[in-house]
Amino acid sequence: MRSPIPNLQEKILEIRNSLRPGQQQMADWESGPLAISAVPGAGKSTGMAAAAAIAIARQYERSSLRRHLVVVTFTRSAAANIKAKIRRFLRDDLSIPQTGFFVYTLHGLALNIASRHSDLSGLQLENVTLITPTQSNRFIRTAVEQWIGNNPRIYLRLLEGHQFDGEETERLRRQSVLRTEVLPELANTVIHEAKSSGISPEKLREWSKQITDEYAILSVAAGLYQQYQNLMRSRDFIDYDDMILAALRVLENDSARRIEQNQVFAVFEDEAQDSSPLQTQLLEILASDGGDNFSLLTPHSPLNLVRVGDPNQAINSTFTPADPIYFRQFCERCDRIKRLATMDQAGRSTRIIIEAANFALKWINNQSLATTNHKQQAPDNRQVPFRLQTIRPVEVNDPQTNANPAAVGRGLELYTPHDIHHTVELLSQRVIELFGEDPTKNSAAILVRENRQGRWLAEAMTSVCKEHNIILYDVGERDRRSHVPQEILGLLQFCDRPHSPDYLKAALEALVQRQLIPTQDLNALASLPEEFLYPGPLAVPQPETVEKAARLCRSLLRARLELPLYQLISFLALTLNYDQAELATADKLAERVNQQIAGNSSMGGMLSALSEIVSSERFEPVETEDSEERYTRPGQLTIITMHKAKGLDWDYVFLPFLHENLIPGRFWVPPQKQFLGDFTLSEVARAQIRAALHGESTIPNVTQAWEQAKNLKISEEYRLLYVAMTRAKRLVWMSAAQKAPFTWSKPDNLQEQAPCPVFPALKRQFPECVMNLGTDKK
């Protein structure tokens, strides 16, 4: 049936003509596969929303079949954002009903399919609890304990490490490291990597037979993974990967697959560089017109799939199963059939910032090629951190208002302060100048590599910002509030069983994290709890750092004896020196727990209620608002990590503390784990699993796998810096102090630090942007 709107084609053309060339290629899509590789600031979400609205309008006009478009993105906030944009195009520009599409996160889509066919998926949602496995999750810890019990001989081999003299204190210390760090870390990494790729514990065992190493790392990993799976099944718990696997079980059924495919005319995926193999498989099946060749890319492919992403902004692959290699491969396959579009024009940043980002990308790739054995390969091969893709400024008549805005100051400013205190002085001075003109007009952010830097900066800059009426917003504070239940549980478990080395160590970790006690070898303290807490008269005197930790732990145990149960959580919150928002979150938590244990008021009941809250993640911290806009408000200086800044932008971006030990970082083995060798089990396992998944002819040995893991980490850190630089619109301020802490858990311990290698290269390339300290800024 024809649409009653005669001028719908004109309206579609109007939207199409308001877009940039790369966005227009997306808007012109009508069927088949299409890959769009987009640079930062190219208008990915706007282009995708416009293309989606046009595709919906064409379907609305030509077809009476009620099929819809499925749009998939990475986070809930991104899903809400793109849904609002599509609706606006449909309502304001096309004047048609705001229907015909659904927007999901990948896991939301999987859950939707699985719950519609619960008989096939095996997911009875009313009976299961969703959790996110983390290293500290009790299921991982329980799986580790059960594996140790079932495999005493292999565990003893790990305990011996490279050499062992049998000394009892050292044996206890190593036990603590293995049970609370090494094995939980290995289990967590492998569960994420293997499960999200559809690899079973049995398959992992098969792979382990292809290689020999002294610890049989993949075999140990398979055992831990199997133990975890058994535990999850016995308790009716599922994780996010189970949701994807359940949806795929549904789609294996011919009838269910046809039902799902017949409801969908196409799938659009945003942030495709963050997809895992199983997620890609799910979308390809859903986007297929039928048949079993849904992943076959040919010019007449039945695959109606549009994937948009930027492999150069892949910054999650060292702590999630996401790997940019899969999107790169999709781009290459689409390129072969002339279905690759490049959105390389970006209007976000001023020209000097674009030049600096392009230079950094090429320089890093060249360095990477020079330091590997792959010099002879093409510069865009998968060994290098970046896909060769240059950001270009937009055309003069671009529809974006204030595209490629004028630079403020020099647009790019490069500083080499004496130390981190001098950094704060220079940064504060620049912030005051920039906000002095009209603070309500402009937005600014300081991007840090880790939360501890952000916390230190927030403390150092609070008084200056208050004096000049600048709003300072530390995003890390919110993250710390969300950890309140976990921290409180850790301390209460210690109060309940102070002689447990695990619980003592977890409590000490919380106290170090809150900077209430100095960083020290916690495994040594936790290995002999009684000696640490109540040293006898003949014991060797404890160092002051140990004595401080012991005093604090004893005060917690005294409170457990002297206070009524209902007051314990509030007491612990005060002990942990929580700020106002954290205290409010702790009060909310106390109220919730006390309600749950009413009628059964016991320590066991309280621990059980708290464990359930922590493992099922059904507790929201106290928030004043919940929108990404709170990060980018005009007149506000936001302190945020580089990871969290992805997808956001500000007029002015400050990047302090650009040191080599953090970007690209040193791939090193912590001293407490060095008894196993000069590698970590989890990183070796990750690299071996990825090599098998990427179809490499052999699985690398330990040395090769460690080298590959190192390269993956270096590449990701450089992509993170690239993302950080491209958040800025009018000024990017970068600095590498001559003296900085080796670790930010001890910020006062300053020493000479080498800058991030790209920083001196930028100084050489842009000498006019090097700030002679004390000179006037334009």
Image (tube, helix red, strand yellow):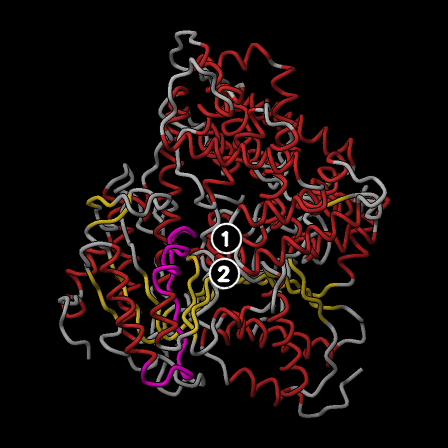
Residue 49's tag is: none
Residue neighbourhood size for the residue with mark 2, other residues' Cα within 10 Å, grouped as few (<14), some (14–19), many (≥20): many
Type of residue at label 1? Phe
* Residue picked out by circle 2: 309
Residue 724 falls in which quadrant of the image?
bottom left
**What element does badge 2 sit on?**
strand
Please tell me which residue is depicted at 36% across the width and 85% down the height of the picture.
438
Residue 225, magenta (yes or no): no
1 or 2: tag closer to the N-terminus: 2
Whether residues under marks 1 and 2 lie with C-beta atoms below 8 angstroms apart, the answer is: yes
Q: Position of residue 597 (x, y in %)?
A: 80, 43
Q: Residue furthest top?
A: 166
Alpha carbons under labels 1 and 2: distance apart: 8 Å
Q: Position of residue 460 (x, y in %)?
A: 34, 60
Drawn side of residue 557 relative to residue 374, left or right: right
**What element does badge 1 sit on?**
helix
Q: Residue furthest bottom?
A: 6
* Residue picked out by circle 1: 327
Residue neighbourhood size for the residue with mark 1, other residues' Cα within 10 Å, grouped as few (<14), some (14–19), many (≥20): many
Q: Is residue 215 above or below residue 184?
A: above
Residue 27 falls in which quadrant of the image?
bottom right
Between residues 734 and 550, which one lies in front from this camera angle? 550
- Picture quarter with the N terminus: bottom right
- Which residues are the magenta region? 436-461
